[in-house]
Amino acid sequence: MKSLRAFLRERSRAIAAAATIGAAVHACSPSPPPRTVEGLAEILGHAVGGQVDPEDIAWEPSPGLVPETFIGRRVLFLARSPDSTNRDVYRAHVRVTVDGKPIDVRLARNITETPLGDDAALEIKNERAVYATVAFGRIQAVSVLDIAGIRKEDRGGGWLDRLLLAITSFQRTGTLAGLGRTDIVLEMPATRAKLTILDGPNRQPTLDVDLGDPKRNLVYDIRSRDIRGADGGQAYAARVSPLLHHPKPFILWAVDTVRSQIGPDAIAWIEQTVFGARDLVRRNTYAMFSEDELKEDGAEPVAAVLDTSALESGESSWPPPSIPSLWKETKAGEGEWAAVDLPWIKAAPGLGSDAKPDAYFYQTFIRPDPKRPYSEVVFVAMDMRQLELRMQAGFEDPKPLTGPPGSGRLPEDPEIRSRIVATFNGAFKTTHGKYGMMLDRRVLIPPVEGGATVVLTDDNEVGLGNWPEIDGIPAEIVSFRQNLDPLVEDGVANPSGRYMWGWQLAGKGMMTERTAMCVTPAGHLYYAWGNELDGPTLGRALRQAGCDYGVHLDMNPRQCGFVHTDIVDIEEKEFQLKLADEKMTIAADKYIHWSSKDFFYVLLRDPTPAFGKSKAGWKPATGVQPPPGWLPGIFRGQVKIGDLAIDFTTLDPGRVDWRVRAGSGEPKVSDARPMKRDLDAAERHRVIAAVGLGHTTSATRYGIAFGPEASLEMRSSYATLVVRRGDRPRIHPPGERLELEKGDEAVQLPILASDGKLVGDFGYTGAMRLRGAHCVTESGRLVVA
């Protein structure tokens, strides 16, 4: 990085050769600011409407005297808006007079646009620039810019694609060559970082990233993009994410380019005119020849709601109940779920060779619009007993407010790729609402309070709901994606009365492709896709299908679709893809190679417990399994400590329910609540296992309760195991205030460990005898040892 003083000395050698040209430029220009770094910072700040500190300016290599005089020399700098302390990286061309005074600033561009992230430590050396991005008090990423332009390996396509990329690059960076960019994403954000660009062996440039911890320090090879630990080993909690520029369909490129120049309102008017005209022609034409009739009662049909608490087996809840129709005469298959049967469909891992699982995808369609009998909504039901849901951010959208964008690619881990069975579209662009997204605990856009949200937890569970009024993000949430208000909430379609479902003209409902995700009271997760729909109609369709909560996803042709997927090797193009419906206009391979927008992908669920997997060697337990019997829910494992073997049994919290019962030797206490000693007759046939608690309470008088009032006094010196129907067991440590509710059952026992640490005398070796214990993991899984 050259100082302004060195830059001026360099220019003085060429003054004589260009005195006439320089004098003419000087004579035609307004009075320039002082020939100082402070003066340069002032003119740069004025050009971008913000504030620039002198130490946050870095000159790019000189293109020569004449280009500098007439076009300007490029400069990278950090600038903040007047009402913010966060800085963004900007690029501009600065023209200067012959004697070195800045004249004007041209082609100023905001390179990063991260209003909630602070870019810092900007430095240039030769053809590279580096900076770090800080958000929420932590360093989220370190970025390397290729000043000479986007690398060849980072762009693809033919001459037209390269031309379109050049135009886009000029819009975004001020040059046709653009800026290459590679982000070193810190999966565990750091509190400090020192960045140093070095010339390695054979002038191979490297970046040293000192994070203040020898185990986390990194060495990044700028040319090869290899990253390793400072000790030469594998990089810890860091990954390299180059910004790739894949070809984009011309129509999508044109819409995005025009939108960036003239604003979204004009594009909304064009879309509304086109889609509105098409809808008018289609509706009138269809009405001339259609014989479809609505049912005479006029009531809105709703699919039956399953009461899962009354079901005796998992099989009785799958597939979902059929969806009733609005119409007197239905089409073939309308509302009736059909199993998705494809040649490459494979069973989830860990089921065993004799397992005969249910189909994990079922599909149907309905016609929810009484004015448009031709408009269909396709539903794909996902059996989340066998499946997991994940999400990925696109390399353009959502555009992060805090740091680098997503990769837009499926994970490279072969184990994960081999389990992917479907992909489908995400939500809106950032410019259409700035709804939140977090990916693997890295916040791209903070959550919007009240926004309809899909959350993924650290126990691979899916949740849908409105984001609550809370500070921070709950620790168990790994990823989330938001979009608009809910389409359905508590079984009510469009509860907010919203008429703008997408960026469109006020008061207008655009009839186009739309998608959603929703959940039923029975826990069935649906993906919905429809053509020629507005938002309220899509909400009514979700309600008709029996959903009690729904989230609007993306909209418009080529942006929406559900793709059944089987991947062997992406690089060798060994994969099989099939759209869920042939009317979907999305490219089937959109999420295989790259995606500029966010998307979801569906994995086969491995039912084997994730915790202790390598140590315990979990295997499905012999004997009775909870329904459905083909899906293991009870696992056995063993851990050896020296000569001792400890046997473990763990039970899937979502597959079993718990009851506490007193033994025949428990003491009877006068005036106390009666103890329950037997199961209800209706529940006895559902028993699949019993766990003894070791001894009666007659000697030590451990507490026991069947409801809010204890049958034996609850003592604050003991731990309390609480079970509740339909919920996961909980262990409350000694001394914690305990309030039992109706239906709760509780028993007290001595505590062995709390917060992962042994308690009291249990940290020492005692008498060797047969012992038993149980614990509850953070995800609510009960483990018996």
Image: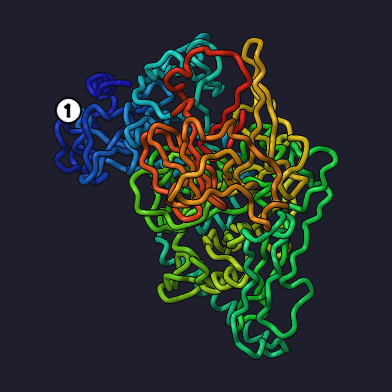
Q: Nearer the viewer, residue 771 or 261?
A: 771
Q: Looking at the figure, which quarter contains the N terminus? A: top left
Q: Quadrant of residue 310?
A: bottom right
Looking at the picture, does residue 644 appear above or below residue 585? above
* Residue 11 on image: x %, y %: 27, 23
* Residue 208 on image: x %, y %: 43, 17
Left or right? Give the position of 596 relative to 44: right
| Residue at image coords 58%, 45% | 661
Q: Is residue 178 visible?
A: no
Q: Is residue 612 visible?
A: yes
Q: Could you tell me the amino acid type at mark 1?
A: Thr
Q: Nearer the viewer, residue 457 or 427?
A: 457
* Residue 58 on image: x %, y %: 31, 27
Q: Nearer the viewer, residue 290 or 708?
A: 708
Please identify the residue farthest to the front as the structure is shown: 670
Left or right? Give the position of 607 relative to 185: right
Q: Quadrant of residue 9?
A: top left
Looking at the picture, does residue 63 appear above or below residue 285? above
* Residue 129 on image: x %, y %: 40, 27
In what element is the residue under mark 1?
loop
| Residue at image coords 61%, 36% | 411
Q: Looking at the figure, which quarter contains the C terminus? A: top right
Left or right? Give the position of 127 relative to 348: left
Looking at the picture, does residue 402 appear above or below residue 219? below
Q: Which residue is mark 1?
A: 36
